[in-house]
Image (cartoon, rainbow, N blue to C red):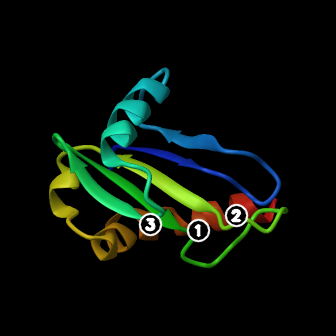
């Protein structure tokens, strides 16, 4: 699955955990999320991509007590199967959940 994934950790600030294969994922990320809006949660199709933003499904917070958001840009063909946040949790979050748990624990 080709995605750009940006989030925070318990003790580290907002960063890209997956760059989607781009040397600099920021322009792609900015283009999609500027069109998707700034809501706390989103599942928004932007062209052939999907912008996802949701709170950490395990309720994790950073060291300041802020809820950790996860933001993904999902590219085709996988973006075609994502229509809801439930789809996103099943298709995008489930494959990376263990990886994030390990990073969060460090």
Secondary structure under tag 2 reads helix
Image quadrant assignment for residue 83 = bottom left
Nearest to the observer: residue 99 or residue 73: 73
- Name the spot of residue 20 as percent of width and height, x first: 41, 36
Question: What whole-number distance in Å separates the C-alpha atoms at marks 3 and 2?
Answer: 14 Å
42 relative to 82 in the view: left or right: right
Question: What whole-number distance in Å separates the C-alpha atoms at marks 1 and 2?
Answer: 6 Å
Question: What whole-number distance in Å separates the C-alpha atoms at marks 1 and 3?
Answer: 9 Å
Are circles 1 and 3 on residues that touch, CB within 8 Å? no
Which residue in the protein does label 3 denote? 93
Which residue in the protein does label 1 denote? 98
Residue shown at the point (64%, 78%) measured from the top left:
59
Query: Quick one: label 3, few (<14), some, or many (20+) residues within 10 Å?
Result: some
Are circles 1 and 2 on residues that touch, CB within 8 Å? yes
Viewer-nearest of discs 3 and 2: 3
Which residue in the protein does label 2 denote? 102
Compared with 98, 20 (above or below) is: above
């Amino acid at each position: 699955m080709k995605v750009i994934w940006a989030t925070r950790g318990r003790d580290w600030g907002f960063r890209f955990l997956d760059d989607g294969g781009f040397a600099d994922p920021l322009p792609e990320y900015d283009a999609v999320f500027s069109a998707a809006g700034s809501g706390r949660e989103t599942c928004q199709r932007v062209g052939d991509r999907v912008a996802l933003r949701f709170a950490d499904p395990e309720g994790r917070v950073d060291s300041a007590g802020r809820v950790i958001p996860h933001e993904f840009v999902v590219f085709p063909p996988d973006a075609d199967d994502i229509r809801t946040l439930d789809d996103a949790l099943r298709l995008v979050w489930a494959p990376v959940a263990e990886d994030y748990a390990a990073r969060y624990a460090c």
